[in-house]
Protein backbone atom coordinates (compact mmCIF):
# COMPACT_ATOMS: atom_id res chain seq x y z
CA UNK A 1 0.00 0.00 0.00
CA UNK A 2 1.40 3.39 -1.00
CA UNK A 3 1.29 6.39 1.27
CA UNK A 4 -0.46 9.04 -0.80
CA UNK A 5 -0.72 11.59 1.99
CA UNK A 6 0.17 15.07 0.80
CA UNK A 7 2.93 16.87 2.68
CA UNK A 8 1.54 20.07 4.24
CA UNK A 9 2.70 23.19 2.44
CA UNK A 10 3.32 21.45 -0.89
CA UNK A 11 1.49 21.26 -4.19
CA UNK A 12 0.30 17.99 -5.76
CA UNK A 13 3.59 17.77 -7.69
CA UNK A 14 5.65 18.14 -4.50
CA UNK A 15 6.74 21.74 -5.02
CA UNK A 16 6.45 24.03 -1.98
CA UNK A 17 3.50 26.40 -1.87
CA UNK A 18 4.77 29.99 -1.64
CA UNK A 19 3.77 31.80 1.52
CA UNK A 20 1.24 34.58 0.90
CA UNK A 21 2.71 38.08 0.91
CA UNK A 22 -0.60 39.54 2.13
CA UNK A 23 -1.70 37.67 5.23
CA UNK A 24 -5.24 37.58 6.61
CA UNK A 25 -4.56 40.30 9.16
CA UNK A 26 -3.34 42.78 6.53
CA UNK A 27 -6.20 41.86 4.19
CA UNK A 28 -8.71 42.44 7.01
CA UNK A 29 -7.19 45.85 7.70
CA UNK A 30 -7.42 46.89 4.06
CA UNK A 31 -10.99 45.63 3.65
CA UNK A 32 -12.07 47.20 6.95
CA UNK A 33 -10.67 50.59 5.97
CA UNK A 34 -12.25 50.37 2.51
CA UNK A 35 -15.65 49.52 3.99
CA UNK A 36 -15.40 52.29 6.57
CA UNK A 37 -14.66 54.86 3.84
CA UNK A 38 -17.21 53.45 1.38
CA UNK A 39 -14.59 52.35 -1.17
CA UNK A 40 -15.55 49.61 -3.63
CA UNK A 41 -13.32 46.59 -4.18
CA UNK A 42 -13.19 47.00 -7.98
CA UNK A 43 -13.43 49.99 -10.29
CA UNK A 44 -11.12 52.89 -11.17
CA UNK A 45 -10.99 54.17 -7.57
CA UNK A 46 -11.52 50.78 -5.94
CA UNK A 47 -9.38 49.13 -3.30
CA UNK A 48 -7.50 46.89 -5.75
CA UNK A 49 -6.71 49.86 -7.97
CA UNK A 50 -5.44 51.89 -5.01
CA UNK A 51 -3.30 49.02 -3.72
CA UNK A 52 -1.84 48.50 -7.19
CA UNK A 53 -1.05 52.22 -7.45
CA UNK A 54 0.57 52.29 -4.01
CA UNK A 55 2.70 49.19 -4.65
CA UNK A 56 3.86 50.35 -8.10
CA UNK A 57 4.72 53.86 -6.89
CA UNK A 58 6.58 52.44 -3.90
CA UNK A 59 8.53 50.11 -6.20
CA UNK A 60 9.37 53.04 -8.49
CA UNK A 61 10.57 55.03 -5.48
CA UNK A 62 12.83 52.15 -4.44
CA UNK A 63 14.19 51.96 -7.98
CA UNK A 64 15.03 55.68 -7.83
CA UNK A 65 16.78 55.20 -4.49
CA UNK A 66 18.84 52.39 -5.97
CA UNK A 67 19.71 54.52 -8.99
CA UNK A 68 20.80 57.57 -6.98
CA UNK A 69 22.40 55.64 -4.14
CA UNK A 70 20.77 57.48 -1.27
CA UNK A 71 17.39 57.75 0.46
CA UNK A 72 15.07 60.70 0.02
CA UNK A 73 16.10 63.68 2.22
CA UNK A 74 19.38 61.93 3.06
CA UNK A 75 22.18 64.55 3.49
CA UNK A 76 24.49 62.10 1.70
CA UNK A 77 22.87 63.18 -1.55
CA UNK A 78 24.13 66.77 -1.34
CA UNK A 79 26.71 67.39 -4.02
CA UNK A 80 26.23 63.96 -5.52
CA UNK A 81 25.62 65.41 -9.00
CA UNK A 82 22.08 64.06 -9.35
CA UNK A 83 18.90 64.27 -7.32
CA UNK A 84 15.18 63.66 -7.39
CA UNK A 85 13.21 66.02 -9.58
CA UNK A 86 9.50 65.49 -8.91
CA UNK A 87 7.21 63.15 -10.82
CA UNK A 88 5.52 62.74 -14.19
CA UNK A 89 1.87 61.62 -14.33
CA UNK A 90 1.32 58.46 -16.32
CA UNK A 91 -1.70 56.18 -16.78
CA UNK A 92 -0.95 52.47 -17.03
CA UNK A 93 -3.42 49.73 -17.94
CA UNK A 94 -3.23 46.82 -15.50
CA UNK A 95 -5.22 43.70 -14.77
CA UNK A 96 -7.35 45.68 -12.32
CA UNK A 97 -7.96 48.55 -14.73
CA UNK A 98 -6.36 51.92 -15.48
CA UNK A 99 -4.03 53.16 -12.72
CA UNK A 100 -2.76 56.76 -12.56
CA UNK A 101 0.87 56.77 -11.43
CA UNK A 102 3.31 59.46 -10.36
CA UNK A 103 6.53 58.27 -12.02
CA UNK A 104 9.75 59.58 -10.44
CA UNK A 105 12.22 61.79 -12.35
CA UNK A 106 15.84 62.67 -11.69
CA UNK A 107 17.61 65.90 -12.63
CA UNK A 108 20.22 64.12 -14.70
CA UNK A 109 17.56 62.36 -16.79
CA UNK A 110 19.41 59.05 -16.42
CA UNK A 111 16.80 57.15 -14.43
CA UNK A 112 15.35 54.24 -16.44
CA UNK A 113 12.63 52.54 -14.37
CA UNK A 114 12.15 48.82 -14.92
CA UNK A 115 8.86 48.18 -13.10
CA UNK A 116 7.04 50.60 -15.40
CA UNK A 117 9.30 51.64 -18.25
CA UNK A 118 9.24 55.09 -19.81
CA UNK A 119 6.38 55.32 -22.29
CA UNK A 120 4.90 52.00 -21.17
CA UNK A 121 1.11 52.16 -21.14
CA UNK A 122 0.25 48.56 -20.29
CA UNK A 123 1.64 46.10 -17.79
CA UNK A 124 2.36 42.58 -19.03
CA UNK A 125 -0.62 41.07 -17.23
CA UNK A 126 -3.01 43.37 -19.07
CA UNK A 127 -1.74 42.20 -22.46
CA UNK A 128 -2.06 38.59 -21.36
CA UNK A 129 -5.64 39.24 -20.27
CA UNK A 130 -6.49 40.53 -23.76
CA UNK A 131 -4.79 37.55 -25.42
CA UNK A 132 -6.66 35.13 -23.14
CA UNK A 133 -10.02 36.67 -24.07
CA UNK A 134 -9.09 36.63 -27.76
CA UNK A 135 -8.07 32.97 -27.48
CA UNK A 136 -11.50 32.10 -26.09
CA UNK A 137 -13.16 33.41 -29.22
CA UNK A 138 -14.19 36.88 -28.01
CA UNK A 139 -14.35 39.44 -30.80
CA UNK A 140 -12.60 42.81 -30.62
CA UNK A 141 -15.96 44.41 -29.85
CA UNK A 142 -16.59 41.88 -27.05
CA UNK A 143 -13.17 42.51 -25.52
CA UNK A 144 -13.62 46.28 -25.58
CA UNK A 145 -17.06 45.98 -23.97
CA UNK A 146 -15.75 43.61 -21.30
CA UNK A 147 -12.83 45.90 -20.37
CA UNK A 148 -15.16 48.90 -20.31
CA UNK A 149 -17.66 47.13 -18.08
CA UNK A 150 -15.22 45.47 -15.68
CA UNK A 151 -12.41 48.04 -15.41
CA UNK A 152 -13.86 51.27 -16.82
CA UNK A 153 -11.05 51.20 -19.39
CA UNK A 154 -11.51 52.26 -23.00
CA UNK A 155 -9.17 50.52 -25.45
CA UNK A 156 -9.05 50.90 -29.21
CA UNK A 157 -9.42 48.11 -31.79
CA UNK A 158 -5.88 48.92 -32.95
CA UNK A 159 -4.53 48.27 -29.44
CA UNK A 160 -6.19 44.85 -29.31
CA UNK A 161 -4.83 44.04 -32.76
CA UNK A 162 -1.29 45.07 -31.76
CA UNK A 163 -1.42 43.03 -28.55
CA UNK A 164 -2.65 39.88 -30.27
CA UNK A 165 -0.27 40.38 -33.21
CA UNK A 166 2.56 39.86 -30.73
CA UNK A 167 2.08 36.11 -31.24
CA UNK A 168 2.59 36.28 -35.03
CA UNK A 169 6.32 35.57 -34.74
CA UNK A 170 5.62 32.72 -32.35
CA UNK A 171 2.97 31.41 -34.76
CA UNK A 172 5.52 31.45 -37.59
CA UNK A 173 8.05 29.43 -35.58
CA UNK A 174 5.63 26.95 -33.99
CA UNK A 175 4.69 24.91 -37.11
CA UNK A 176 8.33 24.51 -38.14
CA UNK A 177 9.68 23.04 -34.90
CA UNK A 178 11.33 19.60 -35.27
CA UNK A 179 9.28 16.55 -34.35
CA UNK A 180 10.00 13.05 -33.04
CA UNK A 181 11.00 10.37 -35.52
CA UNK A 182 8.27 7.84 -34.58
CA UNK A 183 4.66 8.49 -33.57
CA UNK A 184 2.31 5.69 -32.45
CA UNK A 185 -0.81 7.64 -33.53
CA UNK A 186 -1.52 10.77 -35.57
CA UNK A 187 -5.06 12.12 -36.00
CA UNK A 188 -5.77 14.35 -39.01
CA UNK A 189 -8.86 16.30 -39.99
CA UNK A 190 -9.96 19.59 -41.55
CA UNK A 191 -12.01 22.32 -39.89
CA UNK A 192 -14.06 24.64 -42.11
CA UNK A 193 -13.60 28.37 -41.41
CA UNK A 194 -15.10 31.40 -43.17
CA UNK A 195 -12.32 33.57 -44.61
CA UNK A 196 -12.89 36.81 -46.53
CA UNK A 197 -10.65 37.08 -49.58
CA UNK A 198 -12.63 39.39 -51.84
CA UNK A 199 -15.65 37.21 -51.09
CA UNK A 200 -16.38 35.12 -48.01
CA UNK A 201 -15.72 31.42 -48.60
CA UNK A 202 -15.56 28.30 -46.47
CA UNK A 203 -11.90 27.35 -46.35
CA UNK A 204 -10.44 24.25 -44.69
CA UNK A 205 -7.89 24.56 -41.92
CA UNK A 206 -5.97 21.29 -41.76
CA UNK A 207 -5.16 19.99 -38.29
CA UNK A 208 -2.78 17.24 -37.16
CA UNK A 209 -2.56 15.95 -33.58
CA UNK A 210 -0.15 13.25 -32.46
CA UNK A 211 0.41 11.01 -29.46
CA UNK A 212 4.14 10.51 -29.00
CA UNK A 213 5.97 7.54 -27.50
CA UNK A 214 5.64 9.05 -24.03
CA UNK A 215 1.86 9.26 -24.44
CA UNK A 216 1.88 13.07 -24.64
CA UNK A 217 -0.68 14.76 -26.89
CA UNK A 218 0.69 17.40 -29.21
CA UNK A 219 -0.83 19.59 -31.90
CA UNK A 220 1.67 19.19 -34.73
CA UNK A 221 0.39 22.02 -36.89
CA UNK A 222 -2.38 24.07 -38.47
CA UNK A 223 -2.48 24.78 -42.20
CA UNK A 224 -4.94 26.99 -44.10
CA UNK A 225 -6.06 25.37 -47.34
CA UNK A 226 -6.11 27.32 -50.60
CA UNK A 227 -9.35 25.81 -51.95
CA UNK A 228 -12.93 25.82 -50.69
CA UNK A 229 -12.99 22.10 -49.90
CA UNK A 230 -10.79 19.52 -48.20
CA UNK A 231 -8.24 18.11 -50.65
CA UNK A 232 -6.24 14.87 -50.56
CA UNK A 233 -3.60 16.65 -52.65
CA UNK A 234 -3.20 19.34 -49.99
CA UNK A 235 -3.04 16.64 -47.33
CA UNK A 236 -0.14 15.08 -49.25
CA UNK A 237 1.80 18.36 -48.96
CA UNK A 238 0.95 18.63 -45.24
CA UNK A 239 2.07 15.07 -44.49
CA UNK A 240 5.22 15.56 -46.57
CA UNK A 241 5.98 18.65 -44.46
CA UNK A 242 5.60 16.60 -41.28
CA UNK A 243 8.01 14.05 -42.71
CA UNK A 244 10.52 16.82 -43.52
CA UNK A 245 10.25 17.94 -39.88
CA UNK A 246 11.45 14.53 -38.76
CA UNK A 247 8.39 12.24 -38.68
CA UNK A 248 9.81 9.16 -40.39
CA UNK A 249 7.24 6.59 -39.27
CA UNK A 250 3.67 6.56 -37.94
CA UNK A 251 2.02 3.36 -36.74
CA UNK A 252 -1.63 4.47 -37.10
CA UNK A 253 -3.08 7.47 -38.94
CA UNK A 254 -6.71 8.20 -38.01
CA UNK A 255 -8.67 10.20 -40.56
CA UNK A 256 -12.08 10.71 -42.10
CA UNK A 257 -13.30 9.03 -45.28
CA UNK A 258 -11.94 11.62 -47.76
CA UNK A 259 -11.35 10.02 -51.16
CA UNK A 260 -7.65 9.70 -51.96
CA UNK A 261 -6.48 10.37 -48.40
CA UNK A 262 -5.35 6.76 -47.67
CA UNK A 263 -3.22 6.85 -50.83
CA UNK A 264 -1.63 10.16 -49.76
CA UNK A 265 -0.82 8.68 -46.34
CA UNK A 266 0.68 5.59 -47.98
CA UNK A 267 2.99 7.73 -50.14
CA UNK A 268 4.45 9.49 -47.10
CA UNK A 269 4.41 6.65 -44.55
CA UNK A 270 4.15 3.30 -46.39
CA UNK A 271 3.95 1.22 -43.19
CA UNK A 272 1.21 3.28 -41.54
CA UNK A 273 -2.16 1.65 -40.86
CA UNK A 274 -4.89 3.98 -42.11
CA UNK A 275 -7.79 3.88 -39.69
CA UNK A 276 -11.13 5.52 -40.37
CA UNK A 277 -12.13 7.60 -37.36
CA UNK A 278 -14.91 5.64 -35.65
CA UNK A 279 -16.54 8.74 -34.22
CA UNK A 280 -16.59 10.34 -37.67
CA UNK A 281 -18.43 7.26 -38.89
CA UNK A 282 -20.93 7.34 -36.03
CA UNK A 283 -21.65 11.05 -36.46
CA UNK A 284 -22.01 10.63 -40.20
CA UNK A 285 -24.54 7.90 -39.48
CA UNK A 286 -26.60 10.07 -37.15
CA UNK A 287 -26.87 12.81 -39.78
CA UNK A 288 -29.29 10.57 -41.66
CA UNK A 289 -31.54 10.06 -38.65
CA UNK A 290 -34.09 12.04 -36.71
CA UNK A 291 -32.68 13.29 -33.42
CA UNK A 292 -35.22 11.28 -31.41
CA UNK A 293 -33.60 8.06 -32.73
CA UNK A 294 -29.99 9.03 -32.03
CA UNK A 295 -29.74 7.26 -28.68
CA UNK A 296 -31.12 3.86 -29.81
CA UNK A 297 -29.13 4.06 -33.07
CA UNK A 298 -25.87 4.75 -31.24
CA UNK A 299 -26.67 1.93 -28.81
CA UNK A 300 -27.25 -0.55 -31.67
CA UNK A 301 -24.09 0.56 -33.49
CA UNK A 302 -21.92 0.03 -30.43
CA UNK A 303 -21.71 -3.81 -30.86
CA UNK A 304 -20.23 -3.18 -34.33
CA UNK A 305 -17.20 -1.15 -33.27
CA UNK A 306 -16.70 -2.95 -29.93
CA UNK A 307 -16.74 -6.44 -31.51
CA UNK A 308 -13.90 -8.82 -30.72
CA UNK A 309 -13.02 -9.36 -34.39
CA UNK A 310 -14.19 -8.62 -37.93
CA UNK A 311 -16.54 -11.64 -38.09
CA UNK A 312 -18.33 -10.54 -34.92
CA UNK A 313 -18.51 -6.97 -36.21
CA UNK A 314 -20.01 -8.16 -39.52
CA UNK A 315 -22.66 -10.13 -37.62
CA UNK A 316 -23.44 -7.07 -35.47
CA UNK A 317 -23.79 -4.94 -38.62
CA UNK A 318 -26.24 -7.45 -40.09
CA UNK A 319 -28.27 -7.32 -36.88
CA UNK A 320 -28.25 -3.53 -37.09
CA UNK A 321 -29.38 -3.72 -40.75
CA UNK A 322 -32.24 -6.01 -39.79
CA UNK A 323 -33.39 -3.59 -37.10
CA UNK A 324 -32.85 -0.26 -38.90
CA UNK A 325 -32.30 -1.04 -42.57
CA UNK A 326 -35.85 -0.33 -43.66
CA UNK A 327 -35.99 3.03 -41.90
CA UNK A 328 -32.39 4.15 -42.53
CA UNK A 329 -30.84 2.20 -45.42
CA UNK A 330 -28.31 5.02 -45.99
CA UNK A 331 -26.66 4.28 -42.62
CA UNK A 332 -26.19 0.61 -43.49
CA UNK A 333 -24.83 1.61 -46.90
CA UNK A 334 -22.41 4.05 -45.24
CA UNK A 335 -20.89 1.39 -42.98
CA UNK A 336 -20.59 -1.14 -45.78
CA UNK A 337 -18.96 1.42 -48.08
CA UNK A 338 -16.31 2.22 -45.47
CA UNK A 339 -15.90 -1.30 -44.11
CA UNK A 340 -12.36 -1.74 -45.46
CA UNK A 341 -11.18 1.49 -43.77
CA UNK A 342 -12.99 0.63 -40.51
CA UNK A 343 -11.95 -2.99 -39.98
CA UNK A 344 -8.23 -2.37 -39.14
CA UNK A 345 -9.55 -1.04 -35.82
CA UNK A 346 -10.89 -4.52 -34.96
CA UNK A 347 -7.47 -6.15 -35.22
CA UNK A 348 -5.87 -3.89 -32.62
CA UNK A 349 -5.47 -4.97 -28.98
CA UNK A 350 -7.98 -3.36 -26.58
CA UNK A 351 -5.33 -1.00 -25.20
CA UNK A 352 -4.62 0.38 -28.68
CA UNK A 353 -8.33 0.66 -29.49
CA UNK A 354 -8.82 2.69 -26.33
CA UNK A 355 -6.16 5.21 -27.39
CA UNK A 356 -7.71 5.58 -30.84
CA UNK A 357 -11.35 5.75 -29.82
CA UNK A 358 -11.76 6.80 -26.19
CA UNK A 359 -9.44 9.80 -26.27
CA UNK A 360 -10.90 10.88 -29.62
CA UNK A 361 -8.47 13.76 -29.82
CA UNK A 362 -9.40 15.21 -33.16
CA UNK A 363 -13.12 15.45 -32.39
CA UNK A 364 -12.49 16.98 -28.98
CA UNK A 365 -10.08 19.53 -30.41
CA UNK A 366 -12.36 20.40 -33.33
CA UNK A 367 -15.24 21.05 -30.94
CA UNK A 368 -13.13 23.51 -28.98
CA UNK A 369 -11.81 25.24 -32.08
CA UNK A 370 -15.31 25.56 -33.53
CA UNK A 371 -16.35 27.24 -30.30
CA UNK A 372 -13.75 30.01 -30.66
CA UNK A 373 -14.47 30.57 -34.36
CA UNK A 374 -18.27 30.49 -34.13
CA UNK A 375 -18.63 33.90 -32.46
CA UNK A 376 -16.31 35.57 -34.93
CA UNK A 377 -18.34 34.59 -37.98
CA UNK A 378 -15.61 35.29 -40.52
CA UNK A 379 -11.94 36.24 -40.67
CA UNK A 380 -10.37 38.95 -42.85
CA UNK A 381 -7.40 36.76 -43.81
CA UNK A 382 -5.77 33.35 -43.42
CA UNK A 383 -3.35 34.78 -40.88
CA UNK A 384 -6.18 36.16 -38.75
CA UNK A 385 -7.87 32.75 -38.70
CA UNK A 386 -4.65 30.90 -37.88
CA UNK A 387 -3.83 33.41 -35.13
CA UNK A 388 -7.12 32.79 -33.33
CA UNK A 389 -6.87 29.01 -33.76
CA UNK A 390 -3.26 28.94 -32.58
CA UNK A 391 -4.08 31.00 -29.50
CA UNK A 392 -6.97 28.65 -28.76
CA UNK A 393 -4.64 25.65 -28.99
CA UNK A 394 -2.06 27.36 -26.79
CA UNK A 395 -4.74 28.26 -24.29
CA UNK A 396 -5.88 24.66 -23.78
CA UNK A 397 -4.34 23.16 -20.65
CA UNK A 398 -3.37 19.80 -22.15
CA UNK A 399 -1.71 21.42 -25.18
CA UNK A 400 -0.31 24.51 -23.47
CA UNK A 401 3.34 23.48 -23.82
CA UNK A 402 3.75 22.22 -27.41
CA UNK A 403 6.56 19.79 -26.67
CA UNK A 404 5.15 18.40 -23.44
CA UNK A 405 1.38 17.96 -23.41
CA UNK A 406 -0.22 15.52 -20.97
CA UNK A 407 -0.04 11.76 -21.03
CA UNK A 408 -2.93 9.72 -22.40
CA UNK A 409 -4.85 7.67 -19.85
CA UNK A 410 -3.55 4.10 -19.48
CA UNK A 411 -0.54 4.85 -21.67
CA UNK A 412 1.83 2.31 -20.06
CA UNK A 413 -0.42 -0.59 -21.04
CA UNK A 414 -1.04 0.94 -24.47
CA UNK A 415 2.70 1.37 -25.09
CA UNK A 416 3.28 -2.32 -24.36
CA UNK A 417 0.54 -3.22 -26.85
CA UNK A 418 1.97 -0.89 -29.50
CA UNK A 419 5.47 -2.32 -28.98
CA UNK A 420 4.22 -5.89 -29.46
CA UNK A 421 1.74 -5.23 -32.28
CA UNK A 422 4.12 -2.96 -34.23
CA UNK A 423 7.19 -5.08 -33.54
CA UNK A 424 10.46 -3.24 -34.02
CA UNK A 425 8.94 0.14 -34.88
CA UNK A 426 8.50 1.68 -31.43
CA UNK A 427 11.89 2.94 -30.19
CA UNK A 428 13.08 1.50 -26.88
CA UNK A 429 14.19 3.80 -24.07
Image: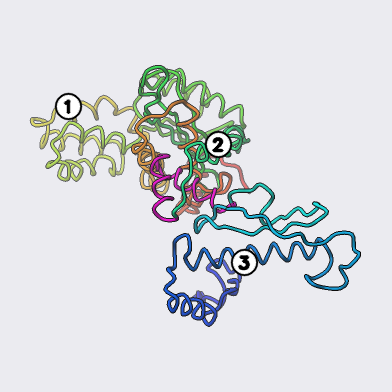
Can residue 385 be found in the magenta stretch? Answer: no
The residue sitting at 13% across, 41% down in the picture is 293
Q: Identify residue for label 3.
A: 55
First in sequence: mark 1 vs mark 3: 3
Foreground residue among 407 and 85: 85
Q: Position of residue 170 (x, y in %)?
A: 60, 38
Which numbered disc covers residue 330? 1
Mark 2–mark 1 Cα distance, whole angstroms, equals 47 Å
Mark 1 vs 3: CB contact within 8 A: no
The residue stretch that appears in magenta: 123-151
295 up-or-down from 187: above or below: below
For label 2, count other residues whose C-alpha is less than 10 Å away and answer few (under 14), some (14-19) or many (20+). some
Q: Identify residue for label 2.
A: 165
Foreground residue among 411 and 235: 235
For label 1, count other residues whose C-alpha is less than 10 Å away and answer few (under 14), some (14-19) or many (20+). some
First in sequence: mark 3 vs mark 2: 3
Left or right of residue 326: residue 188: right
For label 3, count other residues whose C-alpha is less than 10 Å away and answer few (under 14), some (14-19) or many (20+). few
What secondary structure is the magenta-colored segment mainly?
A: helix
Report which quarter residue 54 is drawn in.
Answer: bottom right
179 up-or-down from 70: above or below: above
Foreground residue among 164 and 56: 56
Mark 1–mark 3 Cα distance, whole angstroms, equals 68 Å
Amino acid sequence: MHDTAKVPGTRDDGRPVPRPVVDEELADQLLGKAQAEGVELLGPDGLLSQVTKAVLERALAEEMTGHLGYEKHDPAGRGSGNSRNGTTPETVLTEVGAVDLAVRRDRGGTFEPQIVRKGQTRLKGFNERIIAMYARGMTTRDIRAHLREMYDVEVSPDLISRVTDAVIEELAEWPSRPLDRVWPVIFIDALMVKIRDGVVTNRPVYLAIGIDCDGAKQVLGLWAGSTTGESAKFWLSVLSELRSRGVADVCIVCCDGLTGLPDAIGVVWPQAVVQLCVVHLIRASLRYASRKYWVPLAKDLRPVYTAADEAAAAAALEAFAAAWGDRYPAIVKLWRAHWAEFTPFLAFPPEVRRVIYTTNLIESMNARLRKVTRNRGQFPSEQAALKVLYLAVRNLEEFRRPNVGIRSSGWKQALQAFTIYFDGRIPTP
